[in-house]
């Protein structure tokens, strides 16, 4: 076995031995579905200034910019499909090898792939929310309104401001989700950290806390992360490809598809810094 095969075998062994393994995912798992990291070249923030939450609330101009960006990102948002990375995670959960996915992503692709327990630290772009009465609206409906000329959609029920159910810059992470995520990491015996640069706090503390509590840490990311030195296994490669090999190693039955990769810009909102 070469080092690469050894690393795959080791991840397989860890998964087989783990009782409370969790996956922690970042933008890198979705770039393989054609959703660019919003911070990377070609990403949303190379084209647009981020709209801070306080500006969204106070400025009509900020809201107009926010919705213009949503409108332009809509086609990519609709086109994105789960890739092999998402699929293997769903299969691992079904096989009882991981208990949950904690994600920094807002694209809903884990759920599309079949993952059931998904903790979305930065919310979701799969629906829009009225900030006053909590009514939900489908992004398809909002898109139709904008295509018919509406620049700033408002709530049908109360006239309140609508916003994607994502966490914007300057908005705090959902406390209940964060608490559940830290509980899971506190009790985890293994963490698969996938496609996250592991620098955005407090999210990056989740794998670190698990490791400090004795969990095994596996990092799969295209580039180096600050936690690489602490990890039991580090692989700098494609997540879909690597997890497919892990899945094969474990003998999991899975319908895998050839992975998609492109440089499209992302829809969606930004997590806080
Ligand atoms: Zn409302």
Image (spheres, rainbow, N blue to C red):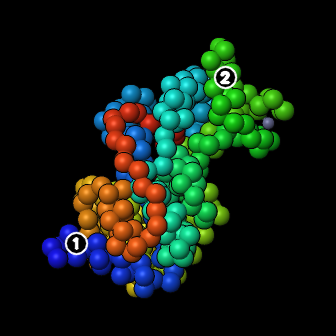
Q: Quadrant of residue 4?
A: bottom left
Image location of residue 69, percent across then percent down: 51, 27
Residue at which label 2 appears: 144
| Residue 123: percent from left, percent from top | 59, 50
Residue 272 shows up from this direction? no
**Which of disc 1 and disc 2 is earlier in sequence?**
1
**Contact flag, marks 2 and 1 (Cβ < 8 Å):** no
Residue 33 visible in the current orientation: yes
* Residue found at x 52% / y 50%: 109
Q: Position of residue 173 (x, y in %)?
A: 57, 55
From the viewer's perspective, is residue 34 above or below residue 104?
A: above
Quarter of the displayed picture in which ligand 1 can be seen: top right
Rendered location of residue 94, percent (x, y): 56, 70
Q: Is residue 143 left or right of residue 104?
A: right
Please tell me which residue is depicted at 39% across the width and 75% down the height of the picture: 250
Farthest residue in the top direction?
149
Q: Secondary structure at mark 1?
A: helix
Query: Which residue does the image show at 42% across and 85% down from the upper left?
Result: 17
The residue drawn where x is 51% and y is 80% is 20
The residue that label 1 is drawn on is 5
Q: Marks 2 and 1, how far apart in space?
A: 49 Å
Q: Is residue 230 above or below residue 113?
A: below
* Residue situated in front as seen by the camera: 233 or 238: 238
**Mark 2 lies within 8 Å of ligand 1 (Cβ measured):** no
């Amino acid at each position: 076995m070469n080092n690469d095969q050894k690393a795959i075998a080791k991840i397989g062994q860890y998964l087989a031995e783990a009782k409370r393994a969790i996956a922690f995912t970042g933008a890198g798992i979705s770039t393989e579905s054609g959703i660019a990291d919003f911070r990377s070249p070609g990403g949303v923030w190379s084209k647009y200034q981020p709209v801070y939450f306080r500006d969204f609330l106070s400025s009509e101009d900020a809201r107009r910019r926010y919705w213009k960006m949503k409108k332009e990102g809509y086609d990519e948002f609709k086109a994105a499909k789960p890739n092999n990375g998402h699929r293997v995670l769903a299969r691992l959960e079904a096989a009882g090898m991981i208990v949950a996915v904690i994600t920094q992503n807002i694209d809903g692709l884990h759920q599309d792939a079949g993952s059931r327990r998904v903790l979305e630290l930065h919310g979701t772009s799969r629906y829009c929310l009225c900030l006053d009465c909590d009514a939900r609206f489908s992004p398809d409906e909002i898109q139709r309104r904008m295509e018919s000329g509406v620049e700033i959609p408002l709530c049908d029920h109360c006239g309140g401001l609508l916003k994607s159910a994502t966490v914007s810059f300057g908005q705090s992470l959902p406390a209940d989700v964060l608490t559940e995520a830290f509980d899971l990491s506190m009790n985890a015996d293994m963490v698969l950290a996938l496609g996250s640069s592991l620098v955005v706090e407090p999210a990056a503390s989740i794998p670190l806390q698990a490791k400090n509590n004795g969990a095994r840490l596996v990092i799969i990311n295209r580039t180096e992360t600050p936690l690489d030195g602490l990890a039991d296994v580090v692989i700098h490669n494609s997540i879909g490809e690597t997890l497919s090999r892990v899945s094969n190693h474990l003998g999991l039955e899975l319908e895998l598809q050839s992975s998609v990769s492109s440089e499209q810009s992302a829809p969606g909102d930004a997590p806080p810094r």
